[in-house]
């Protein structure tokens, strides 16, 4: 299967079900796709997801598509993907892209729309660059958001966290290409000038290298700095075990208990720690972290809370289109409950590390402030680490530290360290 066809098949058949990246992997395996076609399909899906709202805004201009034109969903997706591909693909023929889209429509019985699609995409070739430059250079913060792939409905949340100049700066960061960073088993970090599949790296199977965002590495490194060595560490929402693996590698005498709601992700965490040869110092529980119990005592709790992932939208754009205000509010409520549970589980004299990959105050300072107000025996440790680079780090208002996505290897993160007296 060719790359253009694969991208459209994933996008048209993957509405709010499994993630597109997973769907593409399954399709590539079943169709035995070649590496160049997988790469092209992945690029087209990423371009579609990252700035979908901008491509739709451009198409709404009467010069391209009549507002009266009602198109079937697969045709609409094909046009949107074509607009993004024409305006963002740099080393691929736009003529080949358009022809591939038209051929896909014909094969899927949408031949009568092929003329409209062809005409629209040819106009985009002529006028699209001028239009997109207006968004790029616009003084309007809403246009900056569109150009940076930030959904406009989220703007009230952004405006509560950052002032206008800060928002412009952060939205500019969202246009920096995302590349892979590699954490080596000796603690060093290697920066790559591309994104890679972990299994393709030399030393991966032996546990010598781990693909991990530098922001994630920085956050998890706080365990090494503040863990006293007393009793066990709890990874309260362990996911696939990447941070747990780092913690165990950096703290040779530590033991960790990993809690995870998803049985599939918990199994992935077990496999990850086995790959790193540290599984013998870990135990695993599947279930809701708000209700799970343990016979162990915890002097350090790492809570990487479920969140909007707004700091990683540039690297993983699909998550933002699965979010709305109701889901956002539910996430915030869950974050508060989890942090309160962490404080109750932590021993006196222990620490709780609260982490999100969000850049929004409602999920960060507001959560920490509300929970600290309930527990006078808890206080935040303000001097997390010597993070003085103001381009990378920003102090929360008043709690925690933000890590900004100011280069290709950093994502937007937030960390707050709470000590239970």
Image: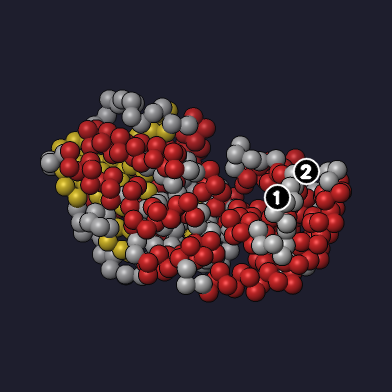
Report the residue that reaches farthest toward the front: 68
Instruction: Determine contact: label 1, label 2, CB under 8 Å.
Output: no
From the top left corner, tell me how far across and down residue 322 is, in percent: 53, 43
Residue at image x 12%, y 40%?
Answer: 377
From the top left corner, tell me how far across and down residue 219 is, in percent: 35, 53
Left or right: residue 4 versus residue 196 is right
* Residue carrying label 1: 77
Can residue 189 be seen here? The reply is no
From the top left corner, tell me how far across and down residue 245 is, in percent: 41, 45
Can residue 374 be seen here? The reply is yes
* Residue carrying label 2: 31
Q: Residues within 10 Å of mark 2 (few under 14, many from 20)?
A: few
Q: Secondary structure at mark 1?
A: helix
Left or right: residue 33 versus residue 348 is right
Q: Earlier in the sequence, mark 1 or mark 2?
A: 2
Q: CA distance from mark 1 to mark 2?
A: 22 Å
């Amino acid at each position: 299967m060719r790359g253009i066809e694969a991208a459209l098949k994933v996008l048209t058949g993957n509405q709010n079900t499994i993630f597109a990246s997973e769907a593409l992997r399954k399709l590539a395996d079943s169709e035995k796709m070649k590496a160049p076609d997988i790469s092209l399909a992945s690029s087209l899906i990423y371009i579609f997801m990252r700035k979908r709202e901008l491509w739709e805004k451009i198409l709404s201009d009467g010069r391209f598509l009549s507002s009266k034109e009602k198109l079937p969903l697969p045709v609409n997706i094909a046009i949107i993907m074509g607009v993004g591909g024409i305006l963002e693909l740099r080393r691929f023929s736009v003529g080949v892209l358009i022809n591939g889209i038209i051929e896909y429509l014909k094969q899927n019985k949408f031949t009568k729309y092929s003329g409209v699609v062809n005409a629209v995409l040819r106009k985009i070739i002529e006028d699209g660059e001028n239009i997109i430059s207006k968004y790029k250079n616009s003084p309007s913060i809403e246009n900056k958001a569109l150009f940076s792939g930030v959904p406009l409905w989220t703007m009230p949340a952004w405006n509560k966290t950052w002032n206008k100049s800060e928002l412009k700066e952060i939205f500019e960061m969202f246009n920096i290409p995302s590349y892979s960073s590699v954490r080596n088993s000796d603690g060093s970090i290697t920066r790559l000038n591309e994104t890679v599949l972990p299994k393709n790296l030399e030393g991966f199977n032996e546990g010598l290298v781990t693909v991990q965002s530098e922001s994630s590495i920085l956050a998890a490194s706080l365990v090494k700095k503040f863990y006293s060595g007393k009793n066990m560490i709890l990874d309260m929402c362990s996911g696939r075990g990447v941070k747990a693996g780092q913690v165990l590698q950096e703290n040779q005498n530590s033991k960790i208990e990993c809690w995870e709601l998803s049985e599939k992700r918990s199994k992935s965490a077990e496999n990850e720690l086995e790959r790193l040869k540290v599984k013998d110092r870990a135990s695993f529980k599947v279930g809701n972290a708000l209700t799970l119990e343990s016979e162990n005592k915890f002097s350090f709790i790492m809570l990487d809370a479920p969140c909007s992932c707004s700091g990683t939208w540039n690297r993983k754009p699909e998550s933002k289109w699965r979010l709305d205000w109701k889901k956002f509010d539910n996430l915030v409520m869950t974050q508060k409950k989890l942090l309160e549970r962490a404080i109750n589980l932590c021993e006196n004299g222990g620490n709780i590390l609260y982490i999100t990959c969000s850049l929004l105050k409602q999920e960060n300072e507001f959560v920490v402030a509300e929970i600290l107000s309930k527990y006078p025996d808890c206080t935040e440790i303000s001097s997390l680490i010597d993070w003085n680079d103001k381009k990378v780090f920003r102090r929360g208002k008043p709690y925690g530290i933000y890590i900004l996505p100011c280069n290709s290897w950093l994502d937007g993160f937030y960390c707050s360290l709470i000590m239970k007296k």
